[in-house]
Image: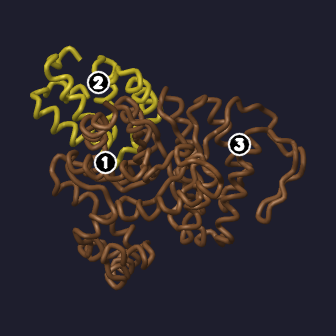
Amino acid sequence: MREIPAELRGELATRLVDLLLEAKEGGKLPSSKAKRILQLWSLGELMESDEGLKLLLEGAAAVDPEELGGILDEYGLEKLREVV
Amino acid sequence: MKFGIEFVPMDLYWRTVFYTIQAEKLGYDHVWITDHFNNRNVYVTLTLIANYTERIKLGPGVTNPYLVHPVMTAQAVASLNEIAPGRVVCGIGAGDRTTLEMVGLEMKTPLRAVREAVEIIRRMVAREKGGYEGRVFRMRGGARFNFKVPQPIPIYIGAQGPKMLRLAGSLGDGVLINASHPDDIAEAMKHVREGVERAGRSLSDIDVAAYTSLSVAEEEKKARKAAIPVVAFIVAGSPPQILERHGISVEAAEGIKKALAERRWADAFGAVTDEMIEAFSICGTPEACIEKIEALSRMGVTQFVAGSPIGPKVRSSIDLFGREVIPHFKE
C-alpha cells in the first residue's frame, strides 16, 4: 500500500469501486470480502484506509483482473500489479 | 419534500446495499426494494440494508397479497423492524398480472385483496386477538404473533388506476403513485383526494409518493440514452388511456411490446421517441430534474422516488442527484 502515492489514493479507490460495481463477473467477489467492503463503506473508511484500498484491489483482481491491470498501468503502479 | 430511491434486486445483493449506503450518506430518506419472485428476495436484501445503515427508511416497494400471504408480509416487516426500529415501511399493491400468471396465480378482486391485506398487516402488527373474516382472507381468533412490535409500521399502497388510488387515499399511510409525468400525477391526485375526503381524512395525513423512472446525468443526451430501455417497458405495459393522454399511438406501443416479447431489443429501443421519454420518465440534467420535481411538488407530492434506471452509471447518478438535486429541496 505504501507504493501508492497519497494524492492518487482517492481517485484510484473510486476507479476500483466503479470496476467492482460494473464488472460482469461481480459474482466472483467472495461474500466475506463483499461484507467487509460494505462494513468499511458504511463506516466511511473504505476509500481512505489501507485496509479498504487493499480490499478493493483484491476484489478487483477477483472480478476483472484485466481491467485492474489496465488501471494500475495507467497510474504507473506496475509493481503493485505484479503483487496483485 | 422527501426523497426515496428504488432498487430492483436483479443485481448482486452487495451492490444494492452499497448503493443504499451511498444514498443514505447523501441524504435520501427512503429505500424501496421491489418484490418479484424472479429476482433476489426482497426481505433478504432489506435485512442486509438494515444491517449496514442507520437512518434511511426501508421497505418492500411493493409486495402483493397473491404471492405472499399478508400474515407473512406482516411477519417479515415486523421482524425487520427489530433490526431497524422505527425505520420500516411496507409498500403493497396488487402486483403485476403478467408475473402472477407466470406462476399460475390469478389477480382476483385486487381492490378487495389489497384492502384486506392492509387490514390484516395492521392487525398483526398491533397483535389484535380477534379473528378476521374477509372475502379473500380469513384468520381465526388468536392467530397472532408471539412477539411484540413496538410501533406501527406505515403502509403505503402502490396504485395506478382510479379505484386503487382512492383506496390508497382512504386507507394508506402513504400512496406510491406509479407515474412520472405531471399530467398523470395530476390525474392520480384527483382520485387520491377523493379517497382521502371519503374517509374523512386530510391529504396531509398521508405521504404522497411519486414512484418515477429517473435518469439523471451531467449531459442530457446520456440521461436520455439510459432511460430508453426502461421507457420501452413502461410504454409496452401502459393502458391505452394513458398512452392517449400523452399522444402516443396504441399501435406504436404494440410494436414495442411485440419487439420486446421477441427479444428484438434494437427494434424495441429504436422505436422509443423523445415524447415517450418525456411522458414516462424524469430525465435530464440536475437542473432539468429540479424543474420537473418542483412541478410534482406543487401538485401535492411529498416524496419523490428515484426509480430505475437512475442514470447511465448508477453510482455517479446517485451521487449527482444527491449533491445537486436533493439539497435544492432540503435547504
Chain B, which colour? brown
Instruction: Identify residue type, mark 1.
Output: Glu
Residue B146: quarter of image = top right
Q: Amino acid at mark 2?
A: Met
Give how far across and how far down residue A62 sits, in percent: 34, 37
Looking at the rendered image, the disc whose residue lies closer to the viewer, 2 or 1, is 1
Identify the residue at horizontal 24%, vertical 32% (top origin). Answer: A14
Residue ID at (70%, 29%):
B150
- Share a chain, discs 3 and 1? yes
| Label pair 2/3, CB-CB below 8 angstroms | no
For numbered disc 3, what is the local secondary structure? helix
Residue B58 in the image, given as x and y percentages of width and height? 52, 39
Percent position (x, y) of residue B238?
43, 72
Which of the chains bears the disc numbered 1? Answer: B
In the picture, which chain is yellow?
A: A
Q: Nearer the viewer, residue B326 or B76?
A: B326
Circle nearer the N terminus (3, 1):
3
In the rendered view of the protein, which quadrant contains the N terminus of chain B? top left
The residue that mark 2 highlights is: A47
Q: Which residue sits at x=47%, y=62%?
A: B188
Q: Is A37 situated above or below B156?
A: above
Other residues around mark 3 within 10 Å, as few (<14) / some (14–19) / many (≥20): some
**Which circle, 2 or 3, is nearer the viewer?**
3
Residue A66 vs residue B153, the one in the foreground: B153
> What type is the residue that disc 3 sits on?
Gln
Inspect this view and state whether residue A61 appears.
no
**Badge 1 element:** helix
**Residue marked by disc 1:** B294
The residue under label 3 is: B75
